[in-house]
Image (cartoon, helix red, strand yellow):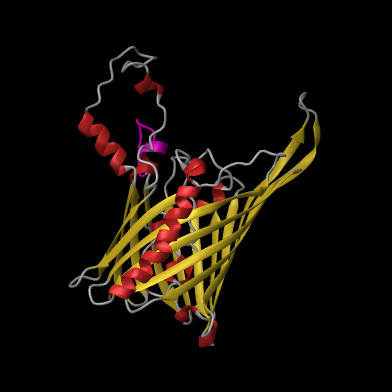
Amino acid sequence: MISSVKNIFKPLAIAFILIFLFSNVAYSQIGGDNTYEFLNLPNSARITALGGNFFAVKDNDIALAQSNPSLITKEMHNNLALSYVDYFSDINYGFVSYGRSFPKIGNYVATMQYINYGDFLWTDETGRELGEFTAGEFAFNLGWGRQLDSNFSIGANLKGIYSSFDEYNSFGLAVDVAGTYYNPESQLTLSLIAKNIGSQIDPYYSNHIEPLPFELMFGMSKRLKHLPFRYSILVTHLEKWDLTYDDPYLDNEGVDPFTGEENKTSGAGDFADKFMRHIVLGGELLLSKNFSLRLGYNYHRRQELKIDTKAATVGFSWGFGFRVSKFHFSYARSAYHLVGSPNYITITTNFSEF
């Protein structure tokens, strides 16, 4: 056991060294301040239904490998996963993942990821139409996973990234480093991952390198012993405590700049709000081996995107999964805003079963 602990902490130590080296880029940089933000989009309907973009459960689901390479196992050999998302407006994105296991080399999952932003009208400063242009981004991900012993596993992703917005193009490289502890007796899984450690190689503008969306995350899942239920807890952005945005309602010395009313916030309430912005809760009701129901809640998403007069179900997500013959289908719907909710579809299969 002691040697296993040493084996798991060695790659994690390397990850933290890389985190330190890139801290000047990563610190205080979250959504909207980075390039290649599409890398953080959830790659499977199952993950989406549970409220996040990362999951810690070891059940040989190849659709989880792209977001957590330490879950890659030899059982994913010859598995295929296809994901498609009908996002907002004309935007859509998808993933294709395929797994291979080599006894002397290791276990691998290759993933191709894309996002299509649609067609845009090209005009000059006077509004005269000059034509159309397209925009899209792509990433090729090669994931590797290794089982150290019955409890510990490690994994890493290598990502080649290409982004194109009309005549502006960029290329970058990034890596993910992850470690997982799994106890089959208690059905407890713990994972830690450092995501998107890297840099632009060829920026959009000459000598203008933009930061990548680095993130340090922790996840856990636990299946209850006497109930067919698994709950999950995801802790996001461990590298940054304050995830709140600059709200003018809070910045004008506690006075609303529009109404002049005094805004009072308690220290305990402020701490609780900042703490919960890191937490994503999810649950799976495992009704049978072939059917499950899923539900998730993302507090940070709800606080950022809700409308105070009508919060509705913003921040909540739900979905289900079922198996038909040799195919496993998953569907999810995640509420981002009142204007609509994207639909997520994932299909997985094992070619070895045919």
- 201 to the left or right of 234: right
Residue 302 falls in which quadrant of the image? Answer: top left
The answer to which of 17 and 50 lies nearer the viewer is 17
The answer to which of 31 and 91 lies nearer the viewer is 31
Instruction: Write the residue at 41% across / 72% down.
Output: 322
**Where residue 33 appears, x then y in whole percent?**
53, 38
- 23 to the left or right of 313: right
Q: Residue furthest top?
A: 260
Instruction: Write the residue at 39% across / 61% down.
Output: 55
Q: Is residue 53 visible?
A: no
Q: Is residue 310 magenta?
A: yes
Q: Tell me the quarter of the image containing the C terminus.
A: bottom right
Eyeballing the image, is 151 above or below 125? below
**Where residue 58 appears, x then y in whole percent?**
37, 71
Q: Residue furthest left?
A: 226
Q: Is residue 342 visible?
A: yes
Eyeballing the image, is 224 above or below 275? below
Q: Is residue 307 magenta?
A: yes
Q: Tell me the quarter of the image containing the N terminus.
A: bottom left
**Where residue 183 appears, x then y in whole percent?**
27, 73
The answer to which of 154 and 83 lies nearer the viewer is 154
- 139 to the left or right of 329: right
**Where residue 246 appears, x then y in whole percent?**
42, 28
Q: Which residues are magenta?
A: 303-313
Q: Residue furthest right?
A: 130
Instruction: Write the residue at 60% across / 41% down.
Output: 210
Numbered marks: total:
0
